[in-house]
Image (cartoon, rainbow, N blue to C red):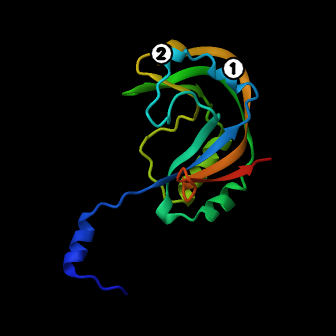
Amino acid sequence: MKFISLKNWLFEKKQSKKVEYGCVMLYATVPNWKDHISIIDKDDIYDDEIKDFGLEKTPHCTVLWGIHLDETEPENVKKFISTFSSIEVTINNISIFPGGDYDVVKYDVPVTPELLKYRDALIANFPNTQTFPDYHPHMTIAYVLHGSGKKYVKKIKPFKVKFDTIVYSFKGGNKEGKNNIKIKLS
């Protein structure tokens, strides 16, 4: 057992511990993805100095964000998600998440029994924090300037998407500060 002075113990208690989170996502192979993002007017695109926003380059759907990295071994998540299977859905509309600086233009992904089962299993098996009461699976198309997203909201000709790869993204040692465990699903 490590002994620390009362002063150090009190100082340590005052510091708030920053919790870092991991994320499990399903990636989709969408052959004509460039056509999908081409609907966004270039003048509407929101971006920041570090280029975190703009057009989405990799179509995906988040299954669970908020896995506590300090309490979870990546290999345990890898073993767990390797039991999942691919999921096919039909997309039929575009909607938005309105925001402060930007709107998120997105395809709504239907909540299938499989998707809900995967999410619930992750929540039950790994320490996590959830900040939104409801689950709204989606595939982001683009981040656009606040207020410009509403012009993209519409019903579209339905198309099928197969989520065939699962990824656990967590903080790690590569130059971007992220590591990914990527598994091809059958």
| Mark 2, residue position | 150
Q: Quadrant of residue 92?
A: top right
**Is tag 1's residue or tag 2's residue first in the polypeptide sequence?**
1
Which residue lies at the image location 72% right of the left edge and 45% below the top edge?
165
Rounded to the nearest angstrom, the CA distance separating label 1 from label 2 is 20 Å
Question: Can you give x and y, in whole percent of width and height, for residue 50 in the image?
Answer: 46, 37
Residue closer to the observer: 112 or 41 = 41
- Quick one: SS at disc 2? helix
Q: Nearer the viewer, mark 1 or mark 2?
A: 1
Which residue is situated farthest in the right direction here?
A: 186
* Relative to 137, residue 106 above or below: above
Q: Residue furthest left?
A: 7
* SS at mark 1 in the image: helix
Name the spot of residue 96 as percent of width and height, x first: 50, 23
| Relative horizontal placement of residue 102, taking residue 17 as reference (left or right) | right
Q: Local crowd at mark 2 within 10 Å, few (<14), some, or many (≥20)?
A: some
Identify the disc placed on residue 35: 1
Residue at 62% in and 59% down = 77
Q: Residues within 10 Å of mark 1 (few under 14, many from 20)?
A: few
